[in-house]
Amino acid sequence: MPEKKIYDWARGFVLDFSLGDGLSKNALSTKRYLSEMKGMFADAAAFEKITAREDPLVYEFYELGVPEDPGNLAFGASITYPGRVGNEYFMTKGHFHTILETAEVYYTLSGEGGMLLENPEGDVSLQPLEPGKAVYVPKRYAHRSINTGKTPLVSFFVFRADAGHNYATIETKGYRKLVVEGPDGRPKMTDNPKWAAP
Ligand code: MN
């Protein structure tokens, strides 16, 4: 819920979207620390090593508290911070929409990274998140932001306000693919061992 009710969802409004002086004063951010993502990174030993000494902020997102009905659009900002667990880059948990048949748009404002997309049937793609470029997240695809750079990855997002978030399957098995830093220092996709055949 927003701290101040400056949003007139019925008659319209203008919002200062600058994160320093604008949006951060007028929206609440939800913060995800590394300790809240236990089991979501492949290298459990590296995870324990980091969380034994610190609990870094992995990502946060700003929401405005839009009424969640199908005629409204929810929008805000997502910030994924730079870092890695082992060779796996910091990322958001990722989610399907509860209403699976709803899409979303991400427009990158700063930083560099990727949007990992995966549908229930196992189709996977990694789309670049680069300043000035928009990624279309199709309906039925889970989506996760991954920061492969050295600065915060900041995106604007907008989706149908009643879509909802479904983390359940991703919190247990994750995605079929991981995005890791390769030996050449560049990002690459690898298979997630948790998805290996039993
Ligand atoms: Mn979404």
Image: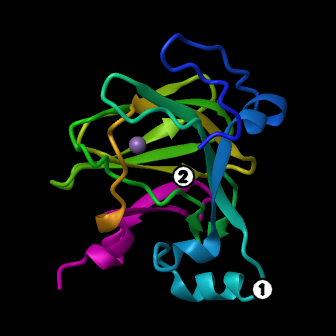
Q: Tell me the colour scheme of the image.
A: rainbow
Does the stretch in magenta take in 194? yes
Numbered tag placed on residue 53 in the rendering? 1
The residue tagged 2 is: 146
Q: Quadrant of residue 169?
A: bottom left
Q: Name which residue lies at 70% across and 41% down.
A: 3
* Figure quadrant, ligand 1: top left
For this orientation, the residue located farthest to the top is 11
Q: Name which residue lies at 39% across and 24% down.
A: 72
Q: Nearer the viewer, mark 2 or mark 1?
A: 1
For this orientation, the residue located farthest to the right is 21
What amino acid type should be assigned to the residue bearing mark 2?
A: Ile
Q: Quadrant of residue 87?
A: bottom right
Q: Name which residue lies at 66% across and 48% down.
A: 29
Q: Secondary structure at mark 1?
A: loop
Q: Residues within 10 Å of mark 2 (few under 14, many from 20)?
A: many
Q: For this view, does 56 lie left or right of residue 163?
A: right
- Return the disc, 2 or 1, that comes first in the chain's sequence: 1
